[in-house]
Amino acid sequence: MAATPQRTAGDRTVPGDGPGPGDRRSGVGRAHGKAILLGEHAVVYGAPALAVPVPQLPVVASATPRPGNGGADQVTFELSGPGSTSRMASSSSGLLRLVAEFRDWAGIADGPRAHVLIDCSIPQGRGLGSSAACARAAVLALADLLGRRLDARATFDLVQASEKVTHGRASGIDAVATGAASPLLFRSGTARELPLPTPGDGSPPAGERAEEGAGARAAADASSAPGARFVIADSGVSGGTWEAVELLRRRFEREPRIREAFVGQVSDLTNEAVHDLAHGRWSDFGRRMTENHRLLRELGISTERIDALVGAALGAGSLGAKLSGGGLGGCMIALAGGPARAAAVVSALRDAGAVRTWIVPAGRYAHHAD
């Protein structure tokens, strides 16, 4: 009863026996990307962390019945999107666990027999939650196919089981944030969405994504809604979360005082940032982001390319900037005081070598249906 991830060759699935014309229905599941605002790495040692959902990076999974009864390969997976082949290989063990845990949850001894197509727009290895978002969308699609509803706790447990297999030690942030509708505070293994005002009409303004050559002009065209913006930039280099976690673990084992100081400082920054968010103190929030980056850089988690992007964002007038995610590559995130400033930051980041950028309004977003 194994789940067999599949790869895609053009428009052809290899191998596969897709749904026939007589299939009864399909199930759909949705998720999105996420970015860490403050607290990465420290959260593993008990510090709080802040994350923001990135609805501009959607993941949609569709589960369709497959003909036949019983036998192996009852659930197969197919992934489309950037880096599909490599991502399928790296996430296969996590998806295997996801299916096994889902069967236990649903009380299914044999089945379901289904094919799950995951359309993921999140680039792999950038600290944006691609594996958790794919797992979340996939398990919601399977539940929908069976007419079962997963509550928030069950969804978290299933996605987290997949994440632990994929990444080893997983904090749980991605398992929650890839389904959140607001900036999220993660503390002591629990998460809560922060009550923030809705930007504009309650959803990200159309076109709030500056990417693939659109640059600052696209960001400026999409700047009708007021308020602060987070600007995420892809350094073009895959992050090394596992390596970074191990680097810090060894360092902290040798020097526990360094660990205590780091966790304490990041905890203070994150707790203060929560109050900044609640009161709209964006300048203070930005300063805490930059200070968090300094602490991570001193521990060797940043890179020259990430540091250059952080410097470019600050030079363009951002209120704060830092690496986001596991580090050793991946993405950085900056805070801009408004849409015009966000456009200027995007332009500066492009000039500094960012390969992709996304603009995320700082507020609550329209939530997709699970």
Image (spheres, rainbow, N blue to C red):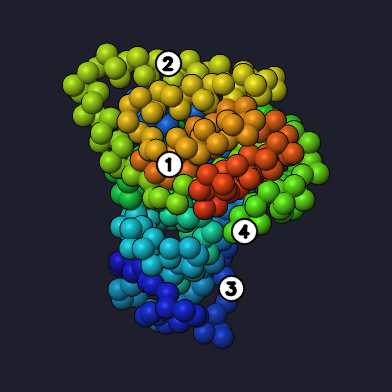
| Marks 4 & 1, CB-CB < 8 Å contact | no
Amino acid on which the number 3 mark rests in the picture? Arg
Residue 115: % across, % down: 45, 72
Q: Which residue is mark 1?
A: 305
Left or right, 110 with reference to 117: left
Q: Is residue 1 visible?
A: yes
Observer-nearest of 35 and 195: 35
Q: Residues within 10 Å of mark 2 (few under 14, many from 20)?
A: some
Q: Report the disc number at residue 213.
A: 4
Amino acid on which the number 4 mark rests in the picture? Gly
Q: Which residue is mark 2?
A: 265
Residue 302: % across, % down: 38, 35
Helix, strand or loop at label 3? It is loop
Q: CA distance from mark 4 to mark 2?
A: 38 Å
Q: Extreme bottom residue here? A: 21
Q: CA distance from mark 3 to mark 1?
A: 47 Å
Left or right, 317 with reference to 102: right
Q: Which residue is mark 3?
A: 25
Q: Nearer the viewer, mark 4 or mark 2?
A: 4
Q: Nearer the viewer, mark 3 or mark 1?
A: 1
Q: Is residue 182 above or below residue 20?
A: above
